[in-house]
């Protein structure tokens, strides 16, 4: 259109002095000036020749002696006809008014500007729509012309004026009136205090997101005794306040970022930026350059660029992707720059490519696999041999309690006084603990001296022992008070001093309800080792391993173990003699005094 005006102005000026005959330049039909109007509403057609006043305007044309003449070519006619002016059809400066427009006015309207030496003409299309041809929502006024746009900053205000209201004021016999409706066809008032109609205008004091949308205004005025009207619409959109910074920024990448790449592979460099909107200057862009040249200037098919944008109240979140196919070694030396720009300013950030260091994936995979296998093996070994590992650790790093306390016995065995359990204690527990494992064992019936009370002796033995081994069986709680006294003494000593630990050995299964209170509490808090008959007879069975874990650490040498065995044998001999004296099994025969120490030795 601008080129048309330049040609028109040159031809018009050149013809002023030289042309002897009128020569009319036909500029065809202007698509930009097409007019839509509803049947029965006031409308007008403006001559497109005066769309650029800087080139030529109506006042200058009148001063130069030009006349403006209107013709029309109605639909269904072949010849142009002069327009007969009347009260309904009139001309006001460069405009042709139809007050009101009717369906028969649809057609092509030609405005011709001429004098004796020059002539120019241009056509514009007028279409009068029937009421059923206009699109509208239920209850909303029908609008033929496209909506004009108004941009208002959030938390800011603006006054809306109905389009062409001033033109109607010039033609009206009195002041026009305006009715406003909002997007959902709600008539004014809009039930809030941020919008108010002041006269014929609508004032928005504080712009909010809910106030965006379509506002429709209907102008009514009186002319020559008739009532005329037309309807216009305004699309109101909110933008970020003009008080905020409008400088463009790059969100990604950072300046000087290095991207590792592999040669002969494809690379995609992404740049994201924020491009604020500036009223009346909407031009904005984001782009990549390679060594200072835009992608379209490289003439290299390996490079391409893809752009995308997200509209955020007219501010654009833009993204551009530089696609590089088949990266070459020389690309590692290039300078890649991402730039953004709007009317306020610009910003640029550069990045580089570098050869990616290849990781030994096979070696790492093998190493990781071996590590996982070793971890699994260690887990299996620990799960299967945790008792052996714990015993090995105790033998290396455990502390021998004989060097840290003054206890006389390692183990005191408490059991129910019946033949079955006594046989288990004497022939199995005592035999293995003393002869195989080297522990000093105290058994009340064997090691107690005559003449003392049972209670005092029991408490004395328990106090002089490092462990109390309780053989739990169905008869434990029913064989008198001796076993219960031993259990209670051990638990009290463990709770008060902490130098004695109680071990429960389950000889035979026992129902919980048949246990006494002390034994029920002990089973909850103490270790329980289960005897499983023939499975537990071997010294390498789980029973003896668990029992050794609970017993004191024994790291004595061979000579020390032999000395301990001799000392234990002497103690058993003395205890046995005492027991026989109590039962009357030893006769009153006089023995040589020297034989006791010899036999003891």
Image (spheres, rainbow, N blue to C red):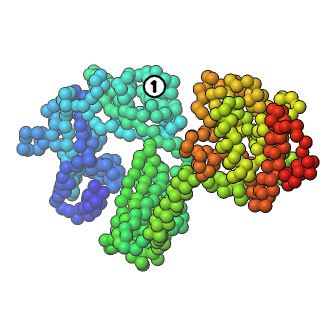
Q: Position of residue 394 (x, y in %)?
A: 70, 54
Identify the residue shown where x is 21% and y is 45%: 124
Identify the residue shown where x is 29% and y is 41%: 93
Q: Is residue 392 left or right of residue 193?
A: right
Q: Is residue 96 left or right of residue 329?
A: left
Identify the residue shown where x is 84% and y is 37%: 587
Q: Position of residue 561 (x, y in %)?
A: 77, 56
Q: Position of residue 421 (x, y in %)?
A: 66, 34
Please rate how many residues cluster around mark 1, counting C-alpha atoms within 10 Å: few if below 14, some from 14 to 19, many from 20: some
Please say if 106 is above or below 435: above
Residue to which mark 1 is pinned: 197
Task: Tell me, yes or no, if residue 70 can be seen here.
Answer: no
The N terminus is located in which quarter? bottom left
- Residue toward you, 70 or 574: 574
In the orientation shown, which residue stands out farthest toward the right? 593
Quarter of the view holding residue 476? top right
Task: Tell me, yes or no, if residue 532 can be seen here.
Answer: yes
Please say if 583 is above or below 29: above
In the orientation shown, which residue stands out farthest toward the bottom? 330
- Residue toward you, 31 or 147: 147
- Residue toward you, 160 or 8: 160
Q: Is residue 140 left or right of residue 475?
A: left
Please say if 334 is above or below 192: below
Quarter of the view holding residue 533? top right
- Residue toward you, 300 or 587: 587
In the orientation shown, which residue stands out farthest toward the front? 589
Quarter of the view holding residue 98? top left
- Determine the secondary structure under disc 1: strand
The C terminus is located in which quarter? bottom right
- Total marks drawn? 1
Please say if 388 is above or below 532: below
Identify the residue shown where x is 52% and y is 54%: 380
């Amino acid at each position: 259109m601008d080129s048309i005006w330049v040609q028109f102005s040159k031809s018009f000026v050149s013809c002023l002095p030289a042309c002897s005959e009128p020569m009319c330049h036909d500029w065809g039909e202007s698509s930009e000036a097409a007019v839509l109007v509803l049947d029965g509403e006031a409308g007008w057609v403006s001559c497109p020749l005066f769309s650029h006043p800087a080139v030529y305007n109506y006042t200058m044309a009148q001063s130069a002696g030009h006349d403006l003449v209107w013709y029309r070519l109605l639909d269904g006619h072949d010849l142009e006809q002069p327009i007969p002016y009347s009260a309904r059809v009139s001309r006001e400066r460069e405009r042709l008014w139809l007050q009101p427009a009717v369906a028969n006015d649809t057609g092509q309207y030609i405005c011709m500007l001429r004098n004796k030496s020059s002539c120019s003409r241009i056509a514009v299309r007028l279409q009068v729509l029937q009421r059923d041809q206009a699109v509208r929502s239920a209850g909303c006024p029908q609008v033929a012309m496209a909506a004009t746009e108004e941009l208002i900053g959030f938390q800011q205000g603006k006054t809306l004026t109905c389009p062409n209201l001033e033109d109607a004021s010039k033609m009206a016999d009195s002041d026009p009136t305006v009715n406003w409706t909002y997007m959902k066809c709600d008539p004014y008032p809009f039930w809030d205090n941020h919008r108010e109609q002041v006269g014929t205008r609508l004032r928005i004091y504080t712009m909010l997101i809910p106030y965006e949308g379509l506002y429709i205004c209907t102008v009514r005025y009186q002319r020559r005794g008739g009532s005329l009207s037309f309807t216009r619409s305004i699309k109101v959109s909110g933008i970020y306040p003009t008080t905020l910074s409008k400088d463009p920024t790059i969100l990604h990448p950072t300046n000087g970022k290095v991207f590792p790449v592999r040669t002969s592979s494809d690379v995609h460099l992404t740049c994201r930026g924020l491009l604020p909107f500036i009223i009346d200057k909407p031009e904005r862009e984001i782009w990549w350059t390679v060594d200072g040249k835009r992608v379209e200037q490289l003439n290299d098919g390996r490079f391409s660029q893809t752009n995308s944008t997200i509209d955020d109240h007219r501010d654009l979140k833009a993204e551009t992707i530089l696609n590089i196919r088949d990266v070459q070694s020389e690309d590692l030396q290039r300078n890649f720059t991402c730039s953004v720009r709007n009317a306020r300013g610009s910003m640029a950030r550069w990045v580089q490519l570098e050869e990616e260091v290849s990781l030994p994936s096979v070696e790492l995979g093998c190493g990781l696999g071996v590590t996982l296998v070793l971890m699994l093996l260690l887990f299996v070994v620990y799960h299967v041999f945790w008792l052996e590992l714990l015993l090995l650790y105790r033998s290396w790093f455990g502390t021998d309690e004989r060097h840290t306390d003054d206890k006389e016995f390692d183990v005191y065995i408490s059991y129910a006084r019946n033949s079955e359990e006594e046989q288990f204690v004497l022939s199995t527990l005592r035999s293995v603990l003393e002869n195989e494992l080297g522990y000093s064992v105290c058994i009340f019936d064997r090691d107690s001296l005559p003449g003392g009370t049972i209670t005092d002796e029991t408490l004395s033995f328990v106090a002089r022992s490092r462990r109390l081994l309780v053989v739990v069986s169905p008869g434990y709680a029913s064989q008198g008070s001796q076993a219960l006294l031993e259990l209670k003494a051990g638990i009290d000593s463990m709770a008060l001093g902490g130098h004695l630990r109680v071990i429960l050995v389950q000889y035979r299964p026992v129902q919980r309800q048949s246990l006494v209170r002390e034994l029920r509490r002990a089973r909850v808090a103490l270790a329980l080792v289960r005897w499983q008959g023939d499975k537990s007879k071997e010294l390498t069975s789980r029973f003896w391993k668990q029992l050794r874990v609970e017993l004191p650490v024994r790291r004595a040498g061979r000579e020390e173990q032999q000395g301990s065995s001799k000392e234990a044998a002497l103690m058993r001999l003395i205890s046995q003699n005492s027991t026989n004296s109590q039962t009357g099994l030893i006769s009153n025969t006089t023995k040589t005094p020297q034989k006791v120490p010899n036999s003891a030795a």
